[in-house]
Amino acid sequence: MRSLFGYDSQKSYLKSTKRINPTRSPFIKERIEVLYKSDSLDGLIHHVEGLEIGEETFKVLCLENHSNKLGFKERRFIERKVGLQLKGNVDLLAPQIQFAIMEVDGEWMFGEYSKSDSVWLYHQNKPQNYSTALSTRVARAVVNIAIPSIDGVTAIDPCCGIGTVLIEALSMNINIVGSDRNPLVTTGARENIAFFGFEGEVILREIRQIKDTYDVAIIDMPYNLCSVLPFEEKLDMLLSARRIAKKVVVITIEPIDSPLREAGFNIRDRCVAKKGTFTREVIVCE
């Protein structure tokens, strides 16, 4: 994990220019960007002693984990003991910065604390829905797999459907466009994107009509629960994807290794997303 902070020799508080937004992940509810670690609480206190926070107000929390439950009084005692070592303005009600202390597997950790807003949950309430669309949680996870760093990255969802992937990507400020050959879903995707206040291009076209090239393509392979997409059609889509993008992340409900390899892709990684008996495979290709 990249550290959020740097320190000078006088232990002054410096923010990194590369902050990782915890709201990107649909699985992280809370997070500590670890600054200091020690095998004892006293050792940790020694590390943070005299740490200058600057003009921003702060608060220190002591968190418990499932393997080491601390009582309320013990947590408050630790918070005060550590908080007194920091140089800055304390605000217990509305601090600008929250720090946290936690013991994990016998090691004490200290760092900035953040809590996820779970924004993908709000995106479930879009005005237009599609029965076979990805869940917002899976869509957000797929976007993170496909685009771990957004700087300068261009992306496309060439089978965007109702826009679930587009909404998650746009909410993370990713430069992405969408397209689909179905005029009903492209209209719905535009409505959904506008509903959440995002701006994104959604074009009515088949994947073979795409002329531009992108760094990443995310493709949720079209399917019908009552029929299988012919091999030739899958291969045609994948050949088009290989032409327009350097990296492709494919979501599929049926085996697709053979057409992927025939299209010239190298499979770099894969995982499975399950919902009841329904299974989707996420495959990273280059």
Image (cartoon, grey):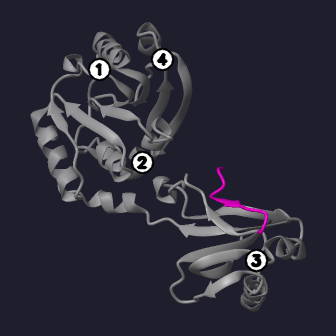
Q: Nearer the viewer, mark 4 or mark 2?
A: 2
Precedes in sequence: disc 2 or disc 1: 2
- Residue 219 within the magenta-colored segment of the rendering: no
Precedes in sequence: disc 3 or disc 2: 3
**For residue 113, above or below residue 90:** above
Element at label 4: helix
CA neighbours of label 2 inside 10 A, class few (<14), some (14 to 19), many (20+): many
Q: Which residue is mark 4?
A: 257
CA neighbours of label 4 inside 10 A, class few (<14), some (14 to 19), many (20+): few
* Residue type beneath disc 2: Arg
Element at label 3: loop
Residue that protrudes farthest toward the bottom in the picture: 73
Q: Which mark is residue 229?
A: 1
Element at label 1: loop
Q: Which residue is mark 3?
A: 69
Q: Which mark is residue 140?
A: 2
CA neighbours of label 1 inside 10 A, class few (<14), some (14 to 19), many (20+): few
Q: Residue at x 30, y 15 (%)?
A: 240
Query: Front-most of 135 and 86?
Result: 86
Q: Are marks 1 and 4 in contact (CB under 8 Å)?
A: no
Spatial CA distance of label 1 from label 4 is 14 Å
Query: Front-most of 264 and 32?
Result: 32
